[in-house]
Image (cartoon, rainbow, N blue to C red):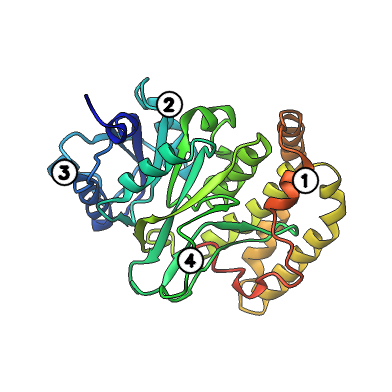
């Protein structure tokens, strides 16, 4: 009879969305072949790459399923598409970026967490900087009441003490595990986002549905970050800061929306000044203008999201960060 780890892990599907990731993708897939508890299924969705990065993956993981799209539909939509392709007995979705390289016991650690903590329905991994292995890339996402989000412990030294397991607001989508049932209930990622902040948005919606997230320190992954889009690129600034606005307008519940709206407006003005002084005025302004244009569409989504809310305002209050001086100096670093 198989042990509990096998029972859980046979139902885990690993999803990788690729777009011109080069050799990183093969390194990522190779890391899955070395897992102490292998996944039940591996699906790679290639978003119309032009660098042949998705060719020959079977050499690194024989059972990998490669799905090639004829256009780049974005990270959010491609993950949703892959989730629909998973087998019927898959009840956990492990999302992995092509520039993220898990240690051999990554899935085993997540499997242990699922078994020991059934009250949690999504889980975050410990991300380390692949280029500076002693530097932490992130231990989960923090969502401030103003709508600003950042990665906890980002750029801290690895010797900084961290609890082995702790509740976090949401995981970074570079390496995260979701209950498939909860993922489907939340309607997956918002495909209007294309990419960036879609993981925070999904985490917020799962929170509103009453689900909680656990950070698993032992589930170690080395992450490059923005390997294909570029750290601090116009692309990442535009999508990240447009989607921050949409995430706030869709998800901040009840009285909190109106109470913290002045802070959110202040955050957006600060963002324009911050990036404007760094030669990025055009792209940051365009992101905010397009965010404003999309508010009617997001407000329609908000009504549907808030109608399904099961979590109390007290629960959401506890999950949000309420620092008096949030990490505005790290405003760019979230989008990498």
Q: Earlier in the sequence, mark 4 or mark 1?
A: 4
Indicate which disc residue 84 carries: 2
Mark 3–mark 1 contact, CB under 8 Å?
A: no
Q: Secondary structure at mark 1?
A: helix
- Measured as percent of width and height from the top left, residue 117 is found at 48, 40
Distance from the alpha carbon under mark 3 to that under mark 1:
50 Å
Picture quadrant of residue 90: top left
Measuring 55% from the left and 38% from the top, which residue is drawn there?
191
Does residue 199 appear left or right of residue 220 in this picture?
right
Q: What residue is at 36 percent from the left and 49 percent from the top?
A: 19
SS under mark 2: helix
Name the residue that disc number 1 marks: 314
Q: Which residue is mark 3?
A: 56
Secondary-structure class at tag 4: loop
Q: Nearer the viewer, mark 2 or mark 1?
A: 1
In this rendering, which labeled residue sits more in front, label 3 or label 2? 2
Question: Is 31 above or below relative to 206?
Answer: below
Q: Counting residues from the N terminus, which is met first, the one under dot 3 or under dot 1?
A: 3
- How many tags in the picture? 4
Q: Disc 3 versus disc 4: distance between alpha carbons?
A: 39 Å
């Amino acid at each position: 009879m198989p042990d509990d780890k096998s029972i859980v892990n046979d139902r885990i599907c690993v999803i990788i969305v690729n777009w011109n990731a080069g050799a990183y993708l093969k390194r990522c897939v190779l890391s899955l072949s070395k897992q102490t508890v292998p996944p039940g299924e591996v699906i790679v969705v290639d978003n119309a790459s032009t660098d042949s990065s998705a060719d020959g993956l079977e050499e690194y993981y024989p059972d990998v399923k490669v799905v090639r799209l004829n256009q780049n539909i974005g990270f959010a939509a491609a993950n949703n598409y892959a989730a629909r392709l998973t087998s019927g007995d898959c009840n956990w979705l492990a999302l992995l970026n092509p520039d993220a390289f898990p240690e051999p016991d990554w899935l085993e650690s997540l499997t242990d967490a699922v078994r020991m903590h059934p009250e949690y329905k999504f889980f975050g991994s410990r991300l380390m900087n692949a280029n500076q292995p002693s530097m932490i890339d992130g231990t989960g996402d923090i969502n401030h009441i103003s709508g600003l989000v950042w990665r906890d412990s980002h750029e801290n030294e690895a010797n900084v003490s961290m609890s082995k397991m702790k509740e976090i607001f949401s995981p970074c989508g570079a390496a995260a595990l979701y209950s498939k049932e909860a993922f489907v209930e939340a309607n997956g990622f918002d495909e209007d986002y294309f990419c960036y902040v879609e993981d925070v948005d999904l985490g917020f919606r799962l929170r509103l549905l009453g689900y909680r997230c656990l950070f698993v320190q032992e589930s170690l992954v080395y992450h490059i970050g923005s390997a294909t889009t570029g750290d601090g690129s116009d692309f990442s600034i535009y999508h990240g800061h447009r989607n921050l606005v949409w995430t706030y307008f869709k998800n901040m519940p009840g009285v909190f929306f109106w109470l913290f709206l002045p802070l959110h407006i202040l955050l957006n003005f600060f963002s324009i000044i911050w990036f404007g002084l760094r030669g990025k005025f055009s792209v940051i302004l365009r992101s905010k203008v397009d965010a404003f244009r999309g508010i009617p569409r997001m407000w329609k989504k908000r009504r549907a999201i808030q109608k399904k809310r099961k979590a109390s305002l007290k629960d959401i209050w506890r999950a949000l960060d309420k620092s008096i001086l949030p990490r505005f100096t790290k405003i760019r670093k979230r989008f990498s």
